[in-house]
Image (cartoon, helix red, strand yellow):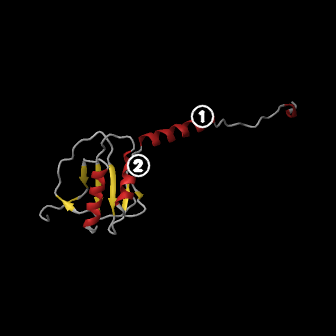
Amino acid sequence: MNLRKFRRESPAIDLTPLIDVVFMLLIFFMVSSTFKDQSMIRIDLPKASQQKQQENQEKPIVLTIDAQGNFYVDDKRVVNTQIDTLKRALKIAIDDRKSPPLTISADGRTPHQAVVTAMDAARQVGLVHLLIATKNAPEGKR
């Protein structure tokens, strides 16, 4: 018996099914994951008692004011604290929406004038649904 005539083929592993399974797992985890919408601007919100929040279909415009009085419209910093600049930034954020709500998130140490300027700018561009963001106060410490 001559063994040299038999050719030995190297075993081949087909990676296509493995790649398909890994791709499907990746899609599954991407679809089933939830992402937290968190701002990178550090502010310390004032405390207040909790009230029921109204359901609104539109996504609100978020106006953040830090402790130094700097404005951020939807996490984008406004170049200065002038009311005209803030009005332009709010108009850009409004885009073509009819009357979106505006949430003002001001740091507890924000100068009062900055909050008044923000509310005045919102009124001048036609935003009439204003919300003030606060933290829930612990019971007995109001």
Identify the residue at the far left of this view.
140
Which residue is at the front of the view, 9 or 45?
45
Q: CA distance from mark 1 to mark 2?
A: 49 Å
Looking at the image, residue 21 lies above or below residue 113 = above
User: The C terminus lies in which quarter of the figure?
Assistant: bottom left
Mark positioned earlier in the residue sequence (1 or 2): 1
Q: On the rendered structure, is 133 left or right of 8?
A: left
Please state, as top left, top right, bottom left or bottom right, where the N terminus lies in the image.
top right
117 or 104: nearer the viewer? 117
Spot occupied by residue 48 in the image (x, y as percentages of width and height): 18, 59
Q: Which mark is residue 119?
A: none
Residue at image coords 25%, 50%: 130
Disc 2 crowd rating (10 Å Cα; few below 14, some 14-19, many 20+) is few
Find residue 5 and report its image quarter: top right
Q: Is residue 52 left or right of residue 82?
A: left
Residue 35 location in percent, x, y? 40, 48
Residue 60 x, y percent position in the rendering:
32, 47
Q: Secondary structure at mark 1?
A: helix
Query: Which sits in the foreground, 93 or 40?
Result: 93
Q: Are marks 1 and 2 in contact (CB under 8 Å)?
A: no
Q: Nearer the viewer, mark 1 or mark 2?
A: 2
The residue that appears at 27% across and 56% down in the rendered structure is: 120
Q: Mark 2: which amino acid? A: Ile
Label at residue 92: 2
Bin the neighbour count of mark 1 within 10 Å (Cα to Cα): few under 14, some 14-19, many 20 and up. few
Residue depicted at x 36% and y 46%: 94
Q: Which residue is mark 1?
A: 17
In the drawing, does residue 19 fall left or right of residue 11? left
Specify the quadrant of the image occupied by residue 134.
Answer: bottom left
Amino acid type of the residue tagged 1 in the rendering: Pro
